[in-house]
């Protein structure tokens, strides 16, 4: 998409974001383009997942008022200085963008973050796509560095999950839980996923890209595009959700928790994890190279899942949990 198209789209979004109708002619005049061009841009936004109504005689309107991401608002230091947050309108994947900037030496500061309004090639775990419609959710990638290399990777994902849970509980009053190893749940449904990508040495310094996708308000078309049950933050809180403030809160919480994790390892987070563990003391099935059933007894001090079987309590280092039927 060209820069001028992006400017037009940004202007359209700001003009419509108050949730009121605006006619195609007024938009065309303000943007200096034809009404057909306006209709084409609106069509592109609808294809990116935005709920825009088009009503003959009234014009265009968002289904709900939205607050756009605002780099200036996010980067205003609130007391303490925080690492920079780059805001993209539409990008392939914030994880890929961050990776490219790190490789090019453009990002070196721990905690530096990229967010986007929409992703055209958002990535989930296990090669899945991450549905990333415009202006509604959070697509967030943050840079960190691990001194103990990939050995620390499992603990890293779990503390990232804890930072999301703390943010959702403190600022939105929701009973968020963690599904080991990488998902955040509200009311037994997934609200956020984590994709950590590492590059570097197994036992030395290693770059970590921490990707977080958090559902805030999904458009009505989402169910056609997501193949697993999901929920959104807005369904569970009465607090208003300003994504700019949410980014500040999440980045601050992540930096605090990762600083502690880098100094002391995962062991000091075991009891916090077990308190918010979605399946603590429940019968589960873990699918990895083989399927195992047992009772979930939380995690050990490396972050491995503890599964109590008829013979023993066994640590599990990778896999996915499903509830036993
Ligand atoms: C999962 O499969 O649950 C992990 C989803 C992670 C999605 C986020 S959105 C921001 C970042 N950029 C990506 O391409 N993926 C992650």
Image: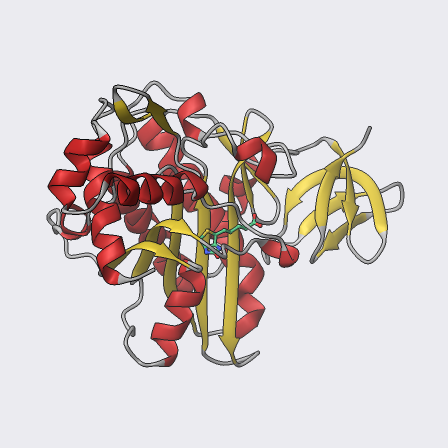
Relative image position of residue 230 (x, y in whole percent): 57, 32
Q: Residue furthest right?
A: 311
Colouring style: secondary structure
Q: In the rendered image of this protein, does residue 44 appear above or below residue 98?
A: above
Which residue corresponds to the image point at 32% horizontal and 58% vertical from the top-left?
A: 114
Which residue corresponds to the image point at 89% horizontal and 46% vertical from the top-left?
A: 311
Which residue corresponds to the image point at 53% horizontal and 34% vertical from the top-left?
A: 222
Q: Which quarter shows the C terminus?
A: top right
Q: Which quarter shows the N terminus?
A: bottom left
Quadrant of the rendered structure where residue 321 is? top right
Relative image position of residue 4 (x, y in whole percent): 22, 58
Most foreground residue, 131 or 154: 131
Relative image position of residue 285 (x, y in whole percent): 79, 40
Most foreground residue, 213 or 279: 213
In this rendering, position of residue 294 left or right of residue 5: right
Relative image position of residue 118 (x, y in whole percent): 39, 49
Q: In the rendered image of this protein, does residue 126 appear above or below residue 280?
A: below
Most foreground residue, 303 or 52: 52
Q: In the rendered image of this protein, does residue 307 appear above or below residue 62?
A: below
Q: Is residue 171 something that shows in the picture?
A: yes
């Amino acid at each position: 998409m060209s820069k001028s198209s992006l400017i037009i789209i940004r202007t359209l979004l700001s003009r419509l974001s108050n949730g009121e109708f605006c006619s195609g002619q007024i938009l065309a005049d303000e943007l200096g383009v034809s009404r057909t061009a306006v209709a084409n841009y609106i069509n592109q936004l609808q294809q990116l997942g935005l709920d825009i109504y088009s009503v003959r005689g009234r014009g265009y309107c968002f289904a709900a008022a939205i607050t756009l991401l605002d780099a200036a608002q996010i980067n205003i230091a609130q007391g303490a200085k925080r690492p920079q947050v780059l805001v993209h309108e539409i990008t392939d994947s914030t994880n890929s963008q961050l990776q490219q900037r790190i490789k090019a030496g453009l990002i070196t500061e721990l905690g530096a973050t990229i967010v986007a309004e929409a992703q055209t090639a958002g990535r989930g775990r296990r090669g899945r796509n991450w549905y990333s419609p415009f202006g509604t959710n959070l697509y967030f990638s943050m840079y960190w560095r691990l001194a103990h290399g990939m050995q620390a990777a499992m603990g890293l994902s779990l503390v990232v999950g804890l930072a999301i849970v703390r943010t959702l509980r403190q600022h939105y009053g929701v009973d968020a839980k963690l599904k080991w190893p990488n998902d955040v749940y509200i009311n037994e449904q997934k609200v956020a996923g984590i994709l950590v990508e590492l590059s570097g040495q197994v036992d030395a310094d290693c770059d970590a890209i921490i990707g977080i996708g958090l559902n805030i308000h999904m458009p009505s078309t989402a169910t056609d595009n997501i193949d697993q049950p999901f929920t959104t933050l807005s369904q569970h809180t009465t607090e208003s959700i300003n994504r700019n403030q949410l980014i500040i809160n999440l980045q601050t919480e992540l930096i605090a928790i990762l600083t502690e994790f880098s100094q002391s390892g995962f062991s000091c987070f075991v009891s916090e994890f077990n308190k918010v563990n979605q399946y603590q003391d429940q019968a589960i099935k873990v699918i990895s190279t083989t399927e195992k059933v047992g009772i979930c007894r939380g995690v050990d001090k490396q972050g491995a899942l503890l599964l109590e079987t008829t013979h023993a309590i066994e640590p599990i280092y990778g896999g996915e949990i499903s509830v036993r039927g």
